[in-house]
Image: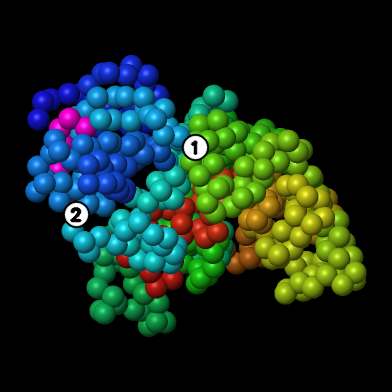
Amino acid sequence: METIRRTKIVDLLKRRDFGSMVNVKGWVRTRRGSKQVNFIALNDGSTINNVQVVVDLANFDEELLKQVTTGSCLSVNGELVESVGAGQACEIQARAIEVLGVCDNTYPLQKKGHSMEFLREIAHLRPRTNTFGAVFRIRHNMAIAIHKFFHDRGFFYFHTPIITASDCEGAGQMFQVTTMNLYDLKKNENGSIIYDDDFFGKQTSLTVSGQLEGELAATALGAIYTFGPTFRAENSNTPRHLAEFWMIEPEVAFNDINDNMDLAEEFIKYCVQWALDNCYDDVKFLNDMFDKGLIERLQGVLKETFVRLPYTEGIKILEEAVANGHKFEFPVYWGVDLASEHERYLVEDHFKRPVILTDYPKEIKAFYMKQNDDGKTVRAMDVLFPKIGEIIGGSEREADYNKLLTRIQELNIPMKDMWWYLDTRKYGSCPHSGFGLGFERLLLFVTGMANIRDVIPFPRTPRNAEF
């Protein structure tokens, strides 16, 4: 077969130099046709769109063509010609075909609809489907958008540790990291594990958040963001929870809660606009196949200013809804940590646009949030989105050493884990704020997928760590 430089299908479909000889490589999505001519839909992952390869059977060896089955990998040389059919502007008249990899008839992705549950069982193959090709191209683009947004605004990308000895959220749901033989753990007379022989000489875990270390960086570099994997050993088998997920956490010196809300709104709108500008084919495919309101919802978020609503006002709205006959699964009262159904009612039914809920009761929020003068609430902010509920959680941080120390003591957080964090409040403390965006939550919104397991290549959930 003559050597011609390969053209990616995404680039080939834009070309109009008909009559040129081209080479494409990719996987067969479908093959159909008559006894004289076959039509092969070839895809190389660079775009949702296939290129049609027209094969005149008289010019090809029958044994070779038997190997051209759904899933097989081909290299095709041919002439770029104008397409007579609707749907695309060009196609390839095949002159030479090489089968790079055969695919036998046990291939599970034959041309038919597959359930999401089934595709999760073959997560090693599901990126080859149109749906997951689209999702993972969008995932890449969202990562690029995030880095570009912060870089263009003078933020520094800061790498926080994945192995840590501190529990940032105080929730205790952490995966432990150890090199010890778990069947032969040494314990002291009180029954506590002795970590002297362990790799780090102390108890260590996978991080639940890079925020505390991010705060240290913000008080030196001014404005930073983290973007990396985080881990929660929370036994939540829901469509919105993963045990391993990615988080984006900006932290900014001298920002108060209002600056923080402005940044969160600007950031999320930037990402949604990026998806519409750079992934439109993929977004439109997902809109047409799964979620007919997806594009409209994305455009709606861009048009509206987010509502800024104190928690106390939000509770009043929810209590009125209950009084008027609306049924919630979980109770509503001042002091409750809102459930997803409550958050979605405020966004989808009451305001019909995204809501930033502020000034939560301090008892249901983390120790590091700045306390308001009322002594009951903190300067927290959660961004609530349609179909998702909470997509961003953040706050102005407590900058006062004594208030922070008192809160740490109230919650019995071990001082051995917190001395370094408190140091920043002793040595030139400053007002600062930040938030965390769960990357997969953003992807759920942008792709319209219904389950968070379907926006990460290999989901980690309770009792599931395959592949």
Q: Determine the residue positioned at 24% across, 24% down.
A: 79
CA gap between label 1 and label 2 equals 28 Å
In the rendered structure, the answer to whether residue 317 lies left or right of residue 282 reads right
Which residues make up the magenta segment?
94-102
- Please, what is the three-letter code of the amino acid marked with disc 2? Cys
State the mark number for residue 103: 2
The secondary element bearing badge 1 is classed as: helix
Asked if residue 103 can be seen in this view, the reply is yes
Residue ID for mark 1:
281
Name the N-terminal-most of marks 1 and 2. Answer: 2
Q: Nearer the viewer, residue 94 or 305?
A: 94
Please name the predominant secondary structure of the magenta segment in the image. strand
Q: Nearer the viewer, residue 364 or 103?
A: 103
Q: Determine the residue positioned at 68% across, 51% down.
A: 385
Asked if residue 379 can be seen in this view, the reply is no
Quadrant that contains the C terminus: bottom left
- Sort mark 2 into few (<14), some (14-19) or many (20+) by Cα contacts within 10 Å: some
The secondary element bearing badge 2 is classed as: loop
Q: Determine the residue positioned at 52% across, 48% down.
A: 286
